[in-house]
Image: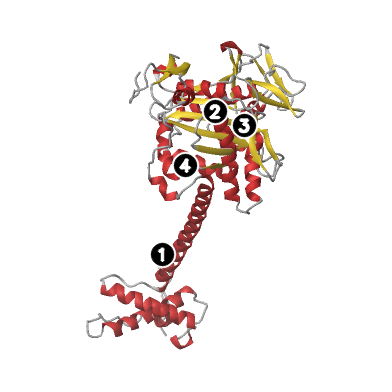
């Protein structure tokens, strides 16, 4: 019996049998591990002859290995046990990889294929959401545009010149009403005519009193033939609705009725109508960050105060107004209990013109006169604006806006004590307080001559040169006919008579 070897320096030699047993055990463990981790047979390199067959086997291995690695606790299923969904997915992957291999690209495994498929689905969802949003925005823009302007939206690419009269002026009627659903929504609260020279950029603004007594056709709504100017729009609209339910046609009829009344008073041809509700003013003023202007109290008081609108400012005060404040000032007309607005509607009209000028100046200085800015502003206003301006004329309006000069806007007041202008006054018709021409009810000749003289760009008209008309023909009444025509254009006619001879064939000045 062999003795155990003594320890050397504290080390005990291992028992050979024990070490051998451990070695055997280790080999068995390694063998077991090797058996479990046995690698799959080496894949053969595909050749053109058996490319499709080998590719299918390779894809099956990829798919099976992937499923096994994905969840080690789940038993691996054979292709026969695969669900229809998995088989369908596998076929799609095979087709995709066949194309990739032919293009020299590396085949995808099942995870890569799923990731790419999910990404495409996500991208398509985002794209679909964008298309829906763009479609809604486009519909909203088209709808608002169609309500606001006449013509096709595609006509905005055109650049038609604005209509004008024989003197080269474009006359635009702008009137405001309350929003739909409010009391008096068909009564015009503010009425203004802008006469514009497209070539020079010179513009005149004329505010017509809402209480001005005018002739109108109002068969169905009020059953009258005359009334206040602010009723004319509603008369035309309601008469049209009595015939048809067409809201657009009724709107056009209302605009035409109030435009006809304005033409009769001013002696101007109205080319365009712009119908807004008072929300437009608040939206525009707020969108440009407010406006700045100097308060004027026209009756000489130190301060103005209006009970109805709660407007209170000192004479000469520099103020910054937001949309709501600008609206309040534009509506203040000296309600009972207030002071500093003794001119009533006339003071209100002057303030409206100041607000219009300040707003236009702020839009210009803010760089919001480009075509895109104007289109965006009009789209935002939506149903709050309705006009017969053609879409093909918007480019021209944008150009005029970019050339806008606030110093070229001049108000034409019909009452101005400082400049001895007294063309309108207050009166009473049938117990109602109204505004009438100083010359008498329905007598507009003085007003028309005043407007024509100021809006006519002719130097002869502006210098008020005195003109005598002599009839040198055998046509009776020709001189009187020309007097009316020239007076309507602003010329000062002092007399008409018959010329010494009646053999003239041409006009001689």
* Residue 493 pos. (x, y %): 47, 17
Circle 4: element type: helix
Quarter of the rendering occupied by the N terminus = bottom left
Placement of 120 over or under 359, stated as above or below: below
Q: Which mark is residue 266?
A: 2
Percent position of residue 131, x then y: 47, 58
Q: Secondary structure at mark 3?
A: strand
Is 105 positioned to the left or the right of 201 in the image?
left
The image quarter containing residue 474 is top left
- Residue underneath mark 4: 375
Cα gap from disc 2 to disc 1, whole angstroms: 129 Å
Q: Earlier in the sequence, mark 2 or mark 3?
A: 3
412 in relation to 419, above or below: below
Between disc 2 and disc 4, the foreground one is: 2
Sequence order check: which comes first, mark 1 or mark 3?
1
Find residue 509 and report its horizontal and vertical position in percent.
35, 18
Work out whether residue 411 can be spotted. Answer: no
- In this rendered view, identify the residue nearer to me: 324 or 217: 217
Q: CA distance from mark 2 to mark 3?
A: 16 Å
Question: Mark 3 or 4 closer to N-term?
Answer: 3
For the point 45% across and 49% down, which residue is it?
153
Q: Which residue is mark 3?
A: 190
Closer-to-camera residue (184/484): 484
- Compared to 70, does 152 lie above or below? above
Q: Can you tell which of label 3 and label 4 is closer to the viewer?
A: 3
Tell me where residue 266 appears, x and y as whole percent.
54, 28
């Amino acid at each position: 019996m062999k003795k155990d070897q003594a320890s050397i320096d504290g080390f005990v030699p291992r028992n050979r049998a024990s070490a051998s047993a451990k070695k055997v055990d280790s080999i068995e463990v390694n063998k077991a591990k090797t058996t479990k981790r046995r690698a799959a047979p080496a894949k053969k390199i595909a050749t053109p002859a058996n490319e499709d067959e080998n590719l299918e086997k390779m894809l099956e291995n990829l798919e099976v290995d992937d499923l096994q690695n994905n969840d080690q606790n789940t038993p691996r299923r054979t292709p026969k046990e695969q669900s229809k969904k998995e088989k369908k997915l596998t076929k799609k992957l095979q087709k995709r990889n066949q194309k990739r291999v032919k293009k020299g690209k590396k085949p995808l495994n099942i995870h890569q294929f799923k990731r790419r498929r999910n990404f495409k689905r996500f991208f398509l969802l985002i794209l679909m959401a964008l298309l829906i949003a763009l479609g809604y925005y486009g519909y909203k823009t088209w709808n608002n545009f169609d309500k606001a302007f006449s013509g096709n939206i595609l006509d905005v690419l055109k650049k038609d010149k604005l209509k004008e009269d024989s003197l080269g002026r474009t006359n635009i009627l702008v009137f405001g009403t309350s929003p739909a659903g409010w009391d008096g929504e068909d009564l015009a609260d503010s009425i203004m005519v802008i006469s514009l020279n497209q070539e020079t950029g010179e513009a005149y603004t004329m505010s017509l009193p809402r209480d001005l007594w005018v002739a109108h056709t109002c068969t169905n709504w009020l059953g009258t033939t005359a009334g206040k100017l602010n009723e004319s729009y509603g008369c035309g609209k309601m008469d049209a609705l009595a015939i048809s339910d067409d809201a657009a046609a009724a709107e056009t009829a209302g605009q035409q009725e109030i435009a006809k009344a304005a033409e009769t008073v001013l002696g101007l041809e109205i080319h365009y109508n712009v119908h807004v509700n008072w929300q437009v003013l608040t939206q525009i003023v707020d969108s440009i960050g407010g406006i700045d202007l100097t308060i004027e109290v026209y009756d000489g008081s130190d301060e103005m105060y209006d009970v109805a609108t709660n407007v209170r400012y000192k004479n000469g005060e520099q103020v910054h107004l937001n949309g709501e404040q600008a609206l309040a000032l534009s509506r203040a007309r000296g309600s009972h209990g207030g002071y500093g607005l003794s001119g009533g509607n006339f003071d209100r009209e002057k303030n409206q013109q100041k607000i219009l000028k300040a707003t236009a100046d702020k839009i210009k200085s803010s760089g919001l006169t480009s075509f895109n800015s104007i289109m965006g502003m009009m789209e935002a206003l939506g149903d709050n604006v309705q006009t017969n301006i053609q879409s093909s004329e918007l480019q021209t309006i944008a150009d005029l806006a970019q050339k806008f000069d606030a110093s070229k806007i001049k108000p034409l007041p019909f009452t101005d004590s400082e400049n001895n202008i007294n063309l309108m006054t207050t009166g009473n018709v049938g117990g109602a307080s109204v505004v009438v021409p100083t010359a008498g009810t329905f007598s507009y000749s003085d007003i028309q001559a005043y407007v024509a003289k100021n809006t006519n760009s002719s130097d002869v008209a502006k210098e008020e040169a005195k003109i005598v008309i002599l009839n040198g023909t055998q046509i009776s009444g020709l001189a009187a006919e020309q007097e009316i025509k020239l007076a309507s254009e602003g010329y000062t006619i002092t007399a008409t008579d018959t010329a010494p001879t009646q053999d003239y064939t041409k006009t001689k000045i």
